[in-house]
Amino acid sequence: MRHKGIAVALALGVSAAASAQDHGAQSRSPLGGAIREALIATPEVLSEVTRRAPPPVDLYAEGAARDLDLLERLATRLFDPAQPGIGPGDAPTRIALFTRADCAACAAAAADLRALAGKLGVRATVFDIEDHAELAQSLGLDMAPSYVMRDRILRGEMPTIVLERYLTK
């Protein structure tokens, strides 16, 4: 149907254009009128051009909302100042670190957080991923180190500059 409308509009336009060439400037008004009438008669011709693009689909929106809800429900456990941690005891707990025994990357992550906690005046709770397997599993954590904040989960060792950026937002 769409191609038929385009063909009709083009045929009228070409016919009127040929007529306009034969008769000069005086025929431009009939050409415009012919095109206008063709478009009024077959509005679907312009629908492809005038239709707004659909909004982009956010493939991760549902999963992100689910994760944020989970983080909110677990916040009291994750950011409990009574948990063992890094940084000043009276500072706000902004991050949870999941580590594993005999993990060099975990030791480096803890050292980075220790430096950042002092610099930024924040606290980090520390969980052993095996001792707190149920909590780690509920968060989908299967590797150490992993970091949990109130609005994100980061798996694997992160550069200090990345952690600092997240902690200062």
Image (cartoon, grey):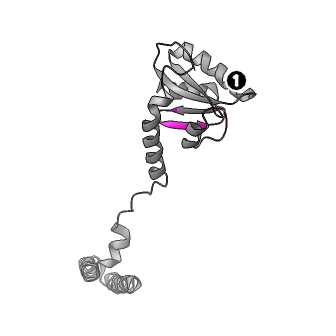
Q: Residue at x 76, y 27 (%)?
A: 102
Determine which residue is flagged by label 1.
108
Give how far across and how far down residue 13 sits, in percent.
34, 82
Q: For mark 1, give the secondary structure.
A: helix
In the rendered image of this protein, does residue 97 appear above or below residue 70?
Answer: above
Rendered location of residue 111, percent (x, y): 66, 19
Q: Is residue 88 found left or right of 98 in the rendered image?
A: left
Q: Position of residue 78 (x, y in %)?
A: 50, 30
The one nearer the camera, 10 or 18, is 10
Residue 3 occupies quadrant: bottom left
| Vertical side of 117 occupied by 7: above or below | below
Residue 157 magenta = yes
Q: Which residues are magenta?
A: 149-158
The answer to whether residue 13 is magenta is: no
Seen at 46% across and 13% down, the residue is: 90
Horizontal and vertical percent position of residue 154:
58, 36
Toward the viewer: 46 or 125? 125
User: Does residue 144 appear to the left or right of 154 in the view shown?
Assistant: right
Taking the spot 67% from the left edge, 38% from the top edge, the residue there is 143
- The quadrant where residue 148 appears: top right
- Mark 1 is surrounded, within 10 Å at the Cα level, by few (under 14), some (14 to 19) or many (20 or more) other residues, namely some
